[in-house]
Image (spheres, rainbow, N blue to C red):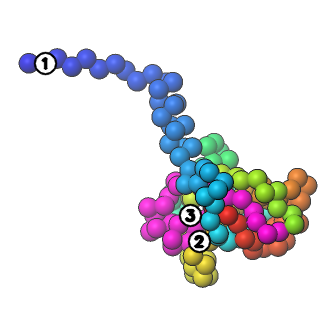
Amino acid sequence: MFARVFQPLTFSTIAVVLLLLINNCASTNPSTFSDAVATWYGSPTGSGSGGGCGFENDVANAPYNGMIAAGNNNIFKSGKGCGACYQVKCANHSLCSGSPITITITDECPGACNIEAFHFDLSGKAFGSLAKPGHADALRKAGKIDIKI
């Protein structure tokens, strides 16, 4: 018989694995960005909700920190898209910073969100983060913007 010796997992090993899982985003190379649409919901600086994915109000805390979105059918994938993260950046608007942000799918955006192939309904906080410094409220007033994913 062979005896197996298992080493206990250390906190640092677990932390590295979790960090790798959290930072595994769909688009990390700016040259691979594709077209999509974004809207926002909730309060202007709010963290949104984890509704369809069961995250509830945890989305306000790390690792999400309110940087979340509800995805349309092509993103939410009947729940299989829960927890997926994307780098998105604002496009074609004078108030856009042009810098990508990382968001996590935590809910479903049904109905009208399925008009476009890829539609992200961002938390107010995430949507405002796409703007140039000091212009988050003005960008939110646009309501619906083109983004790159």
Q: Which residue is mark 1?
A: 2
Q: Residues within 10 Å of mark 1 (few under 14, many from 20)?
A: few
Say whether residue 90 is magenta.
Answer: yes
**What's the amino acid at mark 3?**
Asp
Q: Residue at x 58, y 54 (%)?
A: 27
Rendered view: 49 above or below 72: above
Q: Which x, y percent locates residue 119? A: 62, 71
Q: Which mark is residue 107?
A: 3
Say whether residue 2 is magenta.
Answer: no
Residue 37 horizontal side relative to residue 23, left or right? right
Q: Which of the two marks, 3 or 2, is nearer to us in this view?
A: 2
Give the magenta range: 69-93
From mark 3 to mark 2, how far is it between C-alphas?
14 Å
Q: Which x, y percent locates residue 121? A: 66, 68
Q: Residues within 10 Å of mark 3 (few under 14, many from 20)?
A: many
Q: Which x, y percent locates residue 133? A: 88, 53
Rendered view: 145 above or below 64: below
